[in-house]
Amino acid sequence: MKFKNKTIFISGVNRGLGKSILEKFLKEGANIICTVRKKNKKFSEYLRNLRLIYKNKIQVLYLDFENKDKLILGLNKIKKDLTIDILINNAGYASGSILEMTKIEEIEKTFQINFFSQMLIIQKLLINLKKSKNASIINVGSISSFLNHRGTIAYGSSKASLTFATKVMANEFKRYNIRVNAIAPSAINTDMLKKMDKNSKLKLLKDTNLKKPLSIKTVVDKVIFLSLSKSNKINGKIIKDF
């Protein structure tokens, strides 16, 4: 098992990519601290089944990324003396509209969830990451942050901020032996993609390298690679498209 006795923090695990990342790390022996927005019966049953299958520790934090004060209270439940080896900022919010039709409150909400909350999580858990001998932070960005497509002003800008911050943090945290990288995948074959406007989806795929949606497995494999010690020379990189 590649991550036996390692502790992984993953945000946004109630569906899609986050759920697949969670399951992969559990299979590889990791202990998990994960976040979902709120309790619901379906996720509780899913969690119960995971605990029957795996003997790993699974701590779930119910965090609303729109509420900074409640986010801080939730993160304070993580013990300061706990070592966290991998931190994966996966939680995100999709927003699509051209600027002249977008309320500033919607842009603020998108940045709060996709950027400010990620920065707060890293700040709060840095003390735990410093305790690891080979810590890694992986931010889940988007190819949208490199494209100028109409309707992506809020989402693309928030993800661009996250990827830029990734490079700065990589420089700042290398003294602690903490690597910081990001992935910027194109469209991933998830429920979120299915809800996307057809024309926007076609435009996005047209401007990406593969011209087709990525499988969830492909993205999970990239996250796993950046988490392994054999990638310890990779720092401050934004891995685009795949």
Image (tube, rainbow, N blue to C red):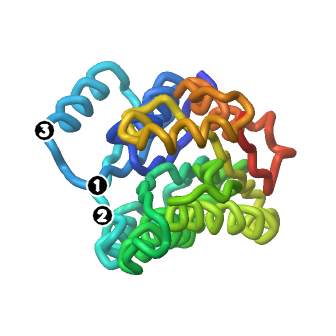
Asked whether the viewer can see residue 234, the reply is yes
Q: Mark 1: give few (<14), some (14-19) or many (20+) Cα within 10 Å.
A: some
Going by the numbered disc 1, the residue's amino acid type is Arg
Residue linked to disc 1: 37
Mark before the other along the chain sequence, 2 or 3? 3
In the drawing, does residue 18 fall left or right of residue 69?
A: right
Contact (Cβ within 8 Å) of mark 2 with mark 3: no
Give the answer, above or below, for where 233 lies relative to 28.
below
Question: Badge 2 local density, few (<14 within 10 Å), some, or many (20+)?
Answer: some
Up/down of 223 relative to 128, above or below: above
Q: Is residue 125 left or right of residue 94?
A: right
Tag 2 secondary structure? loop
What's the residue at 72%, 33% (across, down)? Answer: 242
Residue at 61% across, 35% down = 205
Kind of residue at badge 2: Asp
In whole angstroms, how far apart are the C-alphas of marks 1 and 2?
5 Å
Residue placed under numbered mark 2 in the picture: 64
Q: Nearer the viewer, residue 125 or 241?
A: 241
Q: CA distance from mark 3 to mark 1?
A: 13 Å
Task: Classify residue 139 as left or right of residue 216.
Answer: right
Q: Residue at 63% of width from left, 37% of height from top?
A: 223
Q: Are marks 1 and 2 in contact (CB under 8 Å)?
A: yes
Within 10 Å of the Cα at label 3, are there few (<14), some (14-19), or many (20+) other Cα atoms? few
Q: Secondary structure at mark 3?
A: helix
Pick the quarter of the image with the N terminus. Answer: top right
Query: What label does residue 129 carry, if any?
Result: none
Q: Label 3: which residue?
A: 41
Residue 175 position by quadrant: bottom right
Q: Is residue 121 visible?
A: no
